[in-house]
Amino acid sequence: MIAALIAAAVTLVAAIAVIVAVFVVRSRTKTPYAGQKKDVRSVGNVGVSSTLGGAGKRAGGGAAPRVNSSQPASKAASEGLKSRFLAMGVLTAAIFGSLGAKLWSMQVLASESYSSAAQKNKFTVVPTPAPRGYIYDADGVAIVKNRSSLTVLADAEVANDRDVVQRLSTVLGVPYNVVRQRIQDATSGAQSQRVVASDVRLRDVAFISEHADAFPGVAVQTRTVRDYPFGALAAHAVGYTGSVTADDLAAIPDGREIELGDTVGRAGVESVYDNLLAGDHGQRTVVADAEGNVVEVASETQPERGSDVYLCVKAPVQYVCDRALAELIAPKDGVIGTGKGCAGAVVVMDVRDGGIVALSSYPTFSPETFTGAISQDTWDLFNTDESYHPMLNRAVSGTYPAASTYKAFTGLAALAYGFADTKRTWDCGGSWDGFDTGQPQMCWKHSGHGVLDFRGGVVNSCDVVFYDIGKQFFQAGRSQGGSISDTAMQDEIAKYGFGKKTGIDLGSIEEVGRIPTPEWRAEHFRDYPTEAVWKGGFNTNMAIGQGDVLVTPIQVAVAYGAIATGNLMKPHLLKEVRNSSGGVVRSFEPEVVGTPDVKPENLAVMRDALKGVSTDNAELVALFHKFGLDPATVACKTGTGEVAGKEDYAWFACYAPFDDPKYVVACVVEQGGGGSAVGAPLGIEVLAAALNADAGELTDVGAVAGSTGKSQELATSGSSGRTD
């Protein structure tokens, strides 16, 4: 700035000097003023004086003439030049005065601001990423933590040094063009050091350090990256992380600081509690030259690790869930189709406070795959039908026909409206045509169950009993001349949370499912008038959990928990948050989101019927004993869902202990077969694990493998219908 001002002043002085010189030259060659006589005479007119003839005399006797004087003209020119020099002096003084005043204001009055600006131009503050907090299970087992990674970094200008780039390529075993491209990548900031390679071998780091002169602008740092000691354990619950993108920077949440080069949560707990897991940035103050290249590191402060998140998940129970699903569906080398079904989900919830003890979805993925950046090939693999979409969290996002697990709620609706009680009986002959259509609906047991009371209808999961319940609701509706709402059955079912989100802390991925109503059908089929009319068959299908009914495993778990306790709990994964000093800064408070308005005597009838499913079914009794459980301490319900063009979906829901409920389990296996044959063994094994862990008898935790993405054609059962 000062140099520029001095140059301007010198230029101005030179210009003034040139102007003065022009005026001087001009004044010397100027013609006389108008009226001034010229001093020019002819020779003939000049007299020659002689001392002999006397002074002032000439030969002719006349007086000698005087020579014409030029003194008045010289005086006038001098005075004009003086006035011009005076004007130029005043102008010069004014200019230099202005320059002096400006220099004084800049040097004295504004010196502090210019000094501050100069310092800012000289120093640049570059944030350094902070390690994220750990994710623990309920008992302090680290499910997600950090590990050290030897990282080679390079200043931006190294990309222009071919020799250094070539040396890095040779030492690290990374192609030259890749090394240069990574150094040129400015997404982490213009003055930030660029990551050339992570998880570098110790011997390579040692070589670079020992030959520092050959690697100017290159540094080695020990950075932290996410580490998953148990592989894919609870992957859909904890989620995964990724690098910051432009979209992240354009929509930074309140209370969160995000810089280029940071790691942010992308799914699961990592995403929902990202602001807690993220630490405080460090700062690296560097000296940069005019081209933005770092020439010196002036100071550096270390980042601070984020808070630790403790989940309600119990790692040993989670391990049993993840392993059991994988062994059931893909037992041979992780290939889907070598077992039973193609996908599935399991939810274990503490009915007392809504804490999620385990949440599994298969096929699954290894969160470590997303550390750094996921390859396009892997991402494409995860989004193919052949891989069955490992990224989908089926526990909260998968929607399925509820099948016979729905009968607990349609049964409670029937008890509420008097369409069922403990005295009434039904006669099941294997089919039912209550509307006299000539096209009977079949019971899953084609040979029929015979005469059953309400408890027997639930225990045997008899479809005929529930077809009749659906018919009674339909005929009692106002549209059919009855006295109750056309959606009376649906309204009772909705009391248990179906048709809306449970509110589990996994973000917006949760699906709401569907309770079909006449209004829904009219809207859904508005372009097909003949299909938009609600008919009695829709009621009978809904009564057995088929038709247009859709539920999620988490909804089923919450609903059965409400049968067990009378309270609809909000499910949650978070238990508490602890800061770096170990102090609890946030803890979960159980939330009752609803208390279904159900008569206690009706709940007692349904609970007893669900216990009867455990005690009166010989196959289930054998399974309970196999896993060390007393059938009389468990209430449960099987279900087999039918989906057009696919194999049956196996369901199982249960809670225990019966007299003092602690845990509820809900599981589904897509295209796995019957609920009793496939769903029950899975659910009972998981329930036993939860109870054993509660008693301190289950502590083992092992690694879980992510999905291979491989599958083969599913085996078909060849069955002619549902098995239960």
Image (spheres, rainbow, N blue to C red):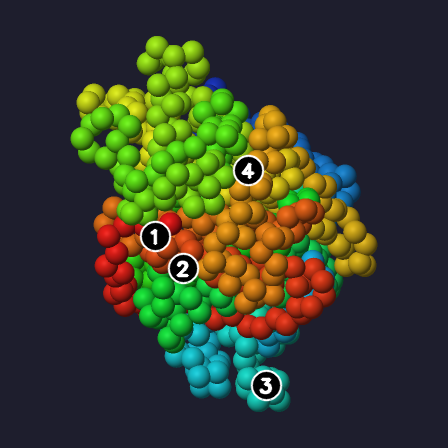
Quarter-of-image position of residue 689: bottom right
Sequence-first disc among 2 and 4: 4
Disc 2 marks a residue whose amino acid type is: Ala
Quarter-of-image position of residue 479: top left
Label at residue 202: 3
* Labels 3, 1: front one: 1
At 59% from the left edge and 77% from the top edge, which residue is drawn? 150
Front-lying residue, 106 or 583: 583
Disc 1 marks a residue whose amino acid type is: Thr
Sequence-first disc among 1 and 4: 4
Circles 2 and 4: CB atoms closer than 8 Å? no
At 38% from the left edge and 50% from the top edge, which residue is drawn? 724
Disc 2 element: helix
The residue pinned by badge 1 equals 723
The residue pinned by badge 2 equals 677
Q: Is residue 87 visible?
A: no
* Labels 3, 2: front one: 2
Disc 3 marks a residue whose amino acid type is: Leu
Disc 4 element: helix
**Spot occupied by residue 219 in the image (x, y as percentages of width and height):** 60, 76
Disc 1 element: loop
Label at residue 585: none
Label at residue 606: 4
Circles 2 and 1: CB atoms closer than 8 Å? yes
**Spot occupied by residue 390 in the image (x, y as percentages of width and height):** 41, 59
Q: Is residue 401 above or below residue 148?
A: above
**What crowding class fits label 4: few (fewer than 14 Cα within 10 Å), some (14-19), or many (20 or more)?**
many
The CA distance from mark 2 to mark 1 is 9 Å
